[in-house]
Amino acid sequence: MIEFYIVIAGMIMMLSCLIFEIERPEIIIPSTLLFFVMTGVISLQEATKGFSNEGMLTIGLLFLIAGSIQGSGIVDHALLKLLDRSNSSRHMLAKLLFPVSILSAFLNNTPIVIAFTPLVKKWCEDHQLSPSKFLIPLSYATILGGTITLIGTSTNLVVHGLLLDHNLRGFTFFELSKVGIPVTLIGLCYLIFFSNYLLPARKSTLAKGENVREFTGEVLILEDFPYIQKTVEQAKLRSLKGLFLVSIIRDTGVITPVSNTTVLKANDRLIFTGDITTITELQGNKGLQLLSTVEDDFPRHHELVQAVVSHHSSLLFKRIKETNFRSRYDAAVIAVHRQNQRLKAKIGDIVLKPGDSLLLVAGAEFQKRIHTNDFYLVTPIDKKILTQKQKKQGWFSVLLLGAMILLVTFGFVSMLTGMTLAALILFLFRIVHPQVAKNAIQWNVLIIISCSFGIGYALMNSGVASFAASLLMEASQPFGIFAVITAIYLLTNVFTELMTNSAAAVMMFPISLEISSAMNLDPVALAVLVTIAASASFATPIGYQTNLIVYGPGGYQFKDFLRIGIPLNIITMITTVTAVHFFWL
């Protein structure tokens, strides 16, 4: 009985840390697993079982294969050609969403959104359209498309691995398509016909205007500033369009709030908040130097890049000056934006949190060093000219993936064997090099997934899964089987808004297994339900990392996701529950 309360306490601690972002998920979840091992809830063998699970190993190989396709640039190139032929917003939305959803059925959706966000944003600006009408639909289309095949998302493969781990039949390659195809088609139609009415015509964080979000930047007063020993008002620092002087930092202390009569001195550090474009224009004023996070003056003719700190970033909860930005990325932070919060600290003293938008001055080596999970790049990029070698390598990777899918679909090889063979061929033909492979694999995701298996064993061993299943059945069973599967879907959907999608699936899988046993239902049916519900995160920007990627570039507010996402959540739930009941139960 003591194990029951230990697991309850551990789960509450884990959920609290994830919700309040105390640390990165890849630290919180392994720490919870270690706690369960040390308290004897699970054995060391059970704790490490996830690291050798077939689903987890397949995910790692898929990162590598998808990375070779994405890195070739052929996908981006094809999209640009597609968009250039579009002549209306609705037509463009349809031509964007359908191909993207098909792509995400076979490739990881995060790199798709990272690659397409700047392309779509640039296309919108060139055609005088608002990016906010397109970027949330882009994210949602990849989530929907990921429900079609076994390799669509890591969540699909995790649940597949859990089924095999419990000596049950796993998913076939296109088994999820019975639910995924209707969910995707209905969802895309909803987005194409209603997103124009439900989404605002809002500019991005890089655009000027009323809806521009506030970035915090730091400016140093040099000896040749013409307004030294004059007031803030005389220096006209109160009348800057789109900027607000938050505080002044000098050797004697911090002045905040700053009054119009405050006298300016040499070496004062001025903390401004406002439009990032206006912040960068301060560099042109005599005697004012826009400060970055490096001591030397970073060349101002370098490219300006906006990046969003990811939930898995190694930069989280560190002061910017402690991150060695210049040496790591050949870039310097010159401004920071945090949603619903006005930052007043020096740039170097700001502690980074998930979702922070950074304005960077990027050097020549920046593009070579950004292949990391630390942040998402969202700056518009120019059209790329592909070399013949890149085209050949890209199409080789696409054909190889297609061949492996056919072999798996017709049962010639298992999923793991097929992907291992594909990865070996990529290495042998030098399409992928070891360093590129290392960067393509999202190690933090693999750690979370592997440790989540142990969390699932803790829920089952302690009786928490049985207890949760009995509560859920007690509340819903009197209303019939339809109510039971709806309740499972809703609970999984709530969990996925609070934690990672794979972790939510792993938590709900043992509960669904207990329910299937108690009610004599097909466990694969409930596994499908959990899989789709764990991926269908539309209501918040933090529920799915692709939503977070488009959050800043689209200039969105939290309520925008609620307005368009909640109806899509309901549509997806009704479609999924109906399809599962029709095909499996």
Image (cartoon, grey):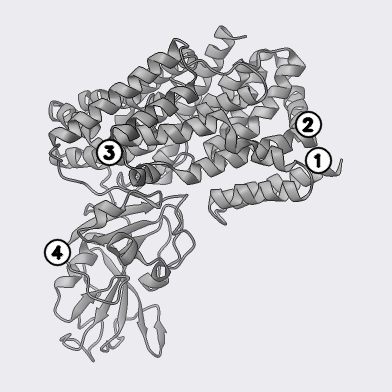
Residue beneath the point at 32% across and 70% down: 293
Look at label 3 and name its amino acid.
Gly
Name the N-terminal-most of marks 3 and 2. Answer: 3
Furthest-front residue in this view: 428
* Alpha carbon distance from label 2 to label 1: 9 Å
Residue 301's tag is 4
* Alpha carbon distance from label 3 to label 2: 47 Å
For the residue labelled by badge 3, is the local secondary structure a helix, a strand or a loop?
Answer: helix
Q: Is residue 280 left or right of residue 101?
A: left
Asked if disc 4 and disc 1 are in contact, CB closer than 8 Å, the reply is no
* Alpha carbon distance from label 2 to label 4: 62 Å
Name the N-terminal-most of marks 2 and 4. Answer: 4
Residue 397 lies in what quarter of the image?
Answer: top left
Asked if disc 2 and disc 1 are in contact, CB closer than 8 Å, the reply is yes
The quadrant in which the C terminus is found is top right
Name the N-terminal-most of marks 1 and 3. Answer: 1
Sort mark 3 into few (<14), some (14-19) or many (20+) by Cα contacts within 10 Å: some
For the residue labelled by badge 2, is the local secondary structure a helix, a strand or a loop?
Answer: helix
Residue 467's tag is 2
Residue with the mark numbered 3 = 71
